[in-house]
């Protein structure tokens, strides 16, 4: 059983709260949920936002497509925004009090969308009102439940003793969720759990909203399904991508996160900060003697300061990270080059979003891949690594913390807005899947001068100030083994070669299954290639494709050329990416010489969906070389 849903309405008016109610309620009944949030970069003011997702009895839940089976709409704007995302057999719940409104009544609606809607209505012979479009949906086989929201909420308010217009307006999200829950046959108990989760600790407010939910559910008699309570046999978690990343940092031993606020990275650092001090488990080795352990989250004055602070923390011995997005990452270039020259291991969590410049600050893109590979001036070893789902976001944070400390290089962990705003009720990832690997510092019995960069060691010794009893120099200038500035050509060549030898060491020591993952039949002649958050959509699409493989690339630098060649040579390939240039296809060609058969790209600020992959694959089969995806859900 899989059911797709969408909850939409005015931005800043409770859509996210309603979604939390809905997702938590469904999840508490024993189901899995995979959903994502879309919203404009202005915080409120009437712009439209929505959450789209799927409900499933098993995990992984399917990634969303380009249409939904259940649409819960706060207002007429939401109906108009998503009229083409409903198909025959879908259910629409909407506020019939807005029937007479047109696109022009919604002043915050995109002008381009309003013109498209009016043009479509004219070409199809109906008035461009909410009712006109609702009737159009009915003719297409959509089941429509139109209710006068304000009238019903006012009547319910009288029943429960609430008459304040301000308070009644706050019941809308609970009212809409309850209508949807009734349509799914979800019992009152689980709706009440969702209400309690979403509304915090105000007991009186929670009780009022529970009563609203009970009364609202009586208004819907139709059923899409009956979600009977289930008992999953695994521990589960309800979180989003930012939270998964922060928890991964904590479990991975990162104890310093520096940042400057930027969408969508801020919540990663703020979750890390909110949880300080961290509780210690009984099996935490020598740390088990502590009840809790501290950490530092530092809001810097800008991104250059943030990466410099993380570098300083790593020099002092902490596992350190900084979180940012594209514009902030630009400001880090100089200090990352410095960390590369000084051979300081730190993590940069890069939450990609749509650019260039401030672009679409709250929209999806995978546009920073090439920038990540080549950021900074000069050549220095680094690792660029990407995660594709929330389990990977969590576990990969542990991996990249290990690698930064082990190889003493900057590690750029590529995440994106789609992952940031993915919300899931899913099995709790097992942190034991990734072992924490630490490097013990060198400690001399008495104070002595020490080489920070010995030529006979690819990885320099871990010397910690105040701990190692060592006098040593770390230098951003080219230097000799002692860390003193040096420009002698022989020494420069030797130091350069020693640093860059880390790339071969990284290639040898990181296991193949942490670099790439192959799905599907080994003898498939056609291969879909993807990276990052395209993974769930491609995997879901793979269930409907025969004799097709999926090569999922996680290690982007050093690029695993031999492994990729093994899977792609003599095969027809379609690369699927959330950027204009097909950047993964470009670097694959650069490092392997393999020319992509086809490239499917989407760069309008929306994630790649399951239907996008299926439609692109049909065009790939038909011989199209460049496939532009322009769907808007």
Image (cartoon, rainbow, N blue to C red):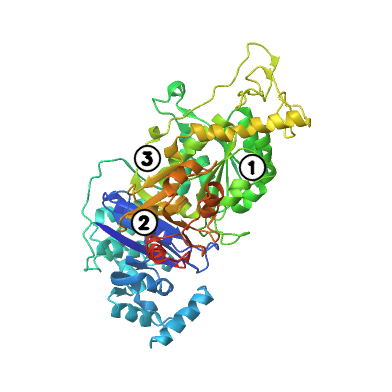
Q: Nearer the viewer, mark 3 or mark 1?
A: 3
Give the residue at mark 3.
429
Q: Position of residue 486 (x, y in %)?
A: 78, 29
Q: Position of residue 581 (x, y in %)?
A: 55, 59
Q: Nearer the viewer, mark 2 or mark 1?
A: 2
Counting the numbered discs, the total is 3
**Residue toward you, 445 or 454:** 454
> What element does badge 2 sit on?
loop
Residue at image point 31% right, 67% down = 156
Q: CA distance from mark 2 to mark 1?
A: 35 Å
53 left or right, relative to 326: left
Give the residue at mark 2.
63
Residue 414 versus residue 608 in the image, above or below? above
Q: Can you tell which quarter of the image residue 258 is in?
A: top right
Whether the residues at callouts 2 and 1 have beta carbons within 8 Å, the answer is no
What residue occupies the far bottom of the structure in this picture? Answer: 125
Q: CA distance from mark 3 to mark 1?
A: 29 Å
What residue occupies the far top of the structure in this picture? Answer: 445
Q: Position of residue 388 (x, y in %)?
A: 44, 48
Residue 18 versus residue 412 in the image, above or below? below
Q: Can residue 194 be seen here?
A: no
**Residue toward you, 112 or 399:** 399
Give the residue at mark 1.
306
Residue at image point 47% right, 79% down = 116
Q: Position of residue 209 (x, y in %)?
A: 34, 59
Q: Can you tell which quarter of the image residue 466 is in?
A: top right
Marks 2 and 1, the one that precedes in the sequence: 2
Q: Can you tell which quarter of the image residue 296 is in?
A: top right
Residue 77 versus residue 600 in the image, above or below? below
Image quarter where the C terminus lies is bottom left
123 left or right, relative to 302: left
């Amino acid at each position: 059983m899989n059911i797709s849903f969408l909850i939409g309405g005015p931005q800043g008016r409770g859509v996210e709260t309603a979604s939390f109610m809905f997702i938590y309620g469904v999840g508490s009944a024993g189901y899995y949920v995979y959903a994502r949030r879309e919203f404009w970069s202005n915080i409120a003011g009437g712009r439209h936002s929505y959450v789209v997702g799927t409900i499933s009895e098993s995990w992984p839940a399917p990634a969303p497509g380009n249409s939904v089976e259940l649409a819960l709409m706060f207002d007429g704007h939401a109906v108009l925004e998503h009229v083409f995302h409903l198909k025959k057999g879908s259910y629409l719940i909407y506020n019939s009090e807005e029937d007479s409104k047109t696109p022009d009544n919604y002043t915050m609606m995109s002008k381009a969308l309003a013109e498209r809607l009016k043009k479509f209505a004219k070409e199809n012979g109906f008035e461009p009102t909410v009712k006109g479009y609702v009737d159009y949906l009915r003719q297409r086989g959509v089941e429509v439940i139109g209710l006068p929201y304000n009238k019903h909420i006012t009547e319910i308010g009288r029943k429960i003793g609430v008459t304040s217009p301000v308070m009644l307006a706050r019941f809308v999200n609970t009212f809409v969720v309850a209508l949807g829950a009734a349509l799914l046959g979800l019992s009152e108990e689980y709706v009440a759990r969702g209400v309690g989760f979403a509304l915090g600790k105000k007991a009186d407010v929670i009780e009022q909203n529970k009563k609203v939910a009970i009364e609202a559910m009586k208004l819907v008699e139709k059923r899409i399904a009956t979600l009977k309570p289930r008992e999953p046999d695994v521990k589960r978690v309800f979180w989003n991508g930012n939270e998964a990343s922060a928890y991964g940092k904590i479990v991975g031993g990162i104890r310093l996160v520096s940042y400057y606020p930027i969408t969508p990275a801020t919540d990663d650092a703020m979750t890390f900060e909110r949880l300080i001090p961290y509780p210690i488990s009984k099996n935490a080795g020598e740390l088990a003697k502590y009840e809790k352990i501290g950490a530092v989250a530092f809001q810097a004055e800008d991104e250059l300061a943030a990466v410099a602070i993380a570098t300083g923390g790593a020099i002092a011995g902490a596992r350190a990270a900084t979180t940012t997005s594209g514009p902030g990452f630009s400001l880090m270039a100089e200090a990352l080059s410095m960390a590369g020259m000084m051979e300081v291991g730190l993590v940069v969590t890069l939450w990609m979003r749509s650019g260039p410049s401030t672009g679409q600050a709250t929209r999806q893109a995978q546009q920073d891949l090439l920038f990540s590979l080549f950021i900074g001036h000069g050549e220095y070893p680094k690792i660029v690594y990407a995660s594709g789902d929330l389990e990977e976001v969590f576990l990969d944070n542990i991996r990249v913390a290990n690698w930064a400390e082990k190889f003493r290089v900057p590690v750029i962990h590529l995440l994106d807005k789609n992952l940031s705003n993915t919300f899931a009720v899913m099995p709790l990832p097992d942190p034991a899947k990734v072992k924490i690997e630490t490097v013990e510092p060198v400690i001399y019995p008495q104070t002595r001068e020490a080489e920070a960069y010995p030529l006979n060691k690819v990885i320099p010794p871990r010397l910690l100030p105040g701990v190692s009893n060592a006098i040593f120099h770390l230098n951003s200038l080219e230097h000799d083994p002692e860390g003193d500035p040096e420009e002698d050509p022989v020494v420069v060549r030797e130091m350069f070669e020693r640093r860059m030898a880390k790339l071969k060491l990284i290639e040898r020591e990181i296991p193949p299954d942490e670099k790439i993952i192959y799905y599907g039949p080994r003898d498939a002649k056609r291969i879909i290639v993807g990276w990052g958050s395209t993974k769930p959509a491609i995997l879901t699409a793979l269930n409907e494709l025969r004799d097709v493989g999926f090569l999922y690339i996680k290690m982007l630098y050093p690029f695993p050329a031999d492994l990729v060649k093994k899977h792609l040579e003599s095969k027809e390939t379609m690369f699927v990416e959330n950027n204009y240039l097909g950047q993964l296809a470009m670097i694959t060609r650069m490092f392997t010489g393999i020319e992509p058969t086809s490239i499917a790209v989407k760069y309008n600020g929306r994630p790649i969906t399951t239907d996008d992959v299926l439609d692109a694959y049909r065009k790939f089969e038909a011989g199209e070389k460049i496939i532009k995806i322009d769907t808007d859900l």
